[in-house]
Structure formats: structure tokens, C-alpha cells
Amino acid sequence: MSDLFIHAENLSFSYADADGKVEDPALQNFSVDIHRGEYVAVLGHNGSGKSTFAKLLNLILEPTSGTLVVNGLDLCRKDLKDEEILQLRKNVGMVFQNPDNQLVATIVEQDVAFGPENLGVEREELRRRVDQSLETVGMSAYAKHEPHRLSGGQKQRVAIAGILAMMPQCVIFDESTAMLDPGGRREVLDTIRLLNREHGMTVLNITHYMNEAAEADRVIVINDGKLLMDGTPDEVFAHREILHNVGLEVPQCAELIHRLRACGISVEGKELSSPEACADMLVRALNNHGTQNRGAQ
């Protein structure tokens, strides 16, 4: 089996207005490959096309032109069968910004069971999936609770459990931490890392938070419907000016290193995405500065 999970080549998509008039492309000649088990952060300003790309991956939207293959299925085929689309949506789960929009039941475990139950999963297997999914996201103790009484981070973890119970191969987080406080955001990020590192799931995290993107293995930047950058977090965040020009920031630690260098302070190293690595770079710079001062005396 190929380790390529997503293949997009010259992919384009245009929305239509209320009168059916086609608007400017939201995605235009967009090409990218994503492999199984990758943890990819997707960045871009509002309206850049990143959420459009996510919705094409499980046919919430249909491509206008180009090539899009997900898990071996050509999504541009005109003769796709209903069972193929159903299987695609089982394999590519999405967690949206507002968890309340994904919670449909009055009890947590019933909510997690909703998706697989509608797929016809037998009761014994359904029970196993619900228990396992809640355990994976650390919410087993809340199985009998009412979702509306949970915190934002807890609700989002329940929404993730509902996706996991479908047993997907890929999970897309579409601004899933945008409405959460820092504590809730940390809970969801820890869950994302667990799914990727320990369960081998392919993860796409669409986010506006640069510190979140820094935790991914790879970062892609979409600007005005086109792929602007693709690389490791350190490689992407080294291009501070390019990111600023398209309305994006860099993580706080990277911003500090860039500003120190702009002031003429020599800070050696290329690891700009990790606070720990940046701290080590600063310590070395301070030590070198102290050594140079002593030598001058």
C-alpha cells in the first residue's frame, strides 16, 4: 500500500454566489502531497483557501478541476458511488471550530456512539469503540455526563471521540481550538499529538495559532488559494518577512530571535519553532557575549 494518503495536483475550486455566478477561485492550481501518519499544520489568512481545501478532502465540497486522490480514491471521478463517499467520510474525519455544532446527544457516551451507530455497527463492537474512544481522549470519567455541562476543551475532546469511534485514518482539525481558552487548547493539542504519535493517524491541523503550528512535523502555508510554503516549522518560520507580508505571524520564540538578530545581536541556530531550542540559543549567545567582553578587558 502506498504511504501517500493525499495527492492534490493543480487542484482548483470556485464558489458560486446566490445567483449562481462563479466567483474567483478559492483554490487555484494547488498541489501538495501528504503521507500517511504525517502531522501537518495548515496556515493562511482568513479566506486563503485552507478550510476549502479541508472540505474538499471528504467531499463536503466537490473539486472544480484538477486532481485530488485521498486514500487511493479519485475524488474528481464523476461516477463515484454512494458507498465510496461513505467510506471516504469514515476514513477522513473533521473536527470543527465550535464543538456544540458536533454534539447531538444529551449524554456523552450516546454522542460518541452516534456516528458508528448510524453506520450499522453492532452493539458489542459499538460499546467497545465508545469506551476506547473516550479513553483515548481522556474522557472516560465523563461518559454519563451531559455535554452542555462540560468545559469548552472537554466538549471538543468529546467531539474528537465521536470522530475516533468511526475509526478514521485521518483527522482534520479545522480551527478546532479557536473558541477555547489556553487550558482547553492545551487539552486538544495533547489529544492531537496522541492520535498522531501513538495511534499513527494522519493529522491536518488548520490553525491561526503559530505556537500550535510549531508542534507539527510539517507546515504548509496557503495564500490566496495557492501553496506559498511547505517545510518543517523551522524552515517555514525562518521566512518571517514573507509570512508578515501575507498577514501571518511567527511563534513568539521565533519572533524574539528575529528581533535580536535585527538589532545586531548574534544568535546562532536554526531551530526557531521550539521554546526550549530558542532558550538554548539565547544562553549560548549570552555566554559568547560574556566571553567576548572578558576577552576585550
Image: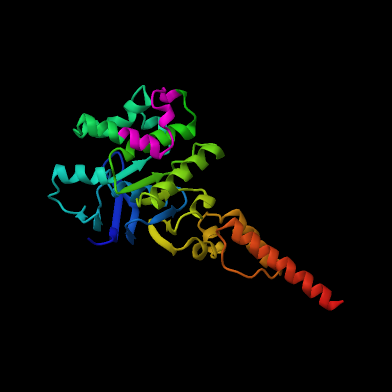
Give the magenta-colored segment's residue range: 130-148
Identify which residue is drawn at 29% across, 34% down: 128
Which quadrant does the C terminus fall into? bottom right
Identify which residue is drawn at 55% across, 59% down: 273
Q: Position of residue 194 (x, y in %)?
A: 42, 47
The answer to which image quadrant residue 244 occupies is bottom right
Q: Position of residue 140 (x, y in %)?
A: 41, 31
Is residue 49 at all visible to an observer of this figure? Answer: no
Decide which of 19, 159 is in the foreground and name it.
Answer: 159
Decide which of 180, 194 is in the foreground and name it.
Answer: 194
The answer to whether residue 115 is above or below residue 201 is: above
Q: Is residue 95 magenta?
A: no
The answer to whether residue 52 is above or below residue 4 is: above
Decide which of 278, 74 is in the foreground and name it.
Answer: 278
Residue most extreme to the right? 297
Identify which residue is drawn at 42% across, 63% down: 230
Position of 156 compared to 113: left or right? right
Q: Position of residue 228 (x, y in %)?
A: 43, 62
Secondary structure mostly seen in magenta is helix
Q: Number of callouts in the render?
A: 0
Q: Position of residue 126 (x, y in %)?
A: 25, 32
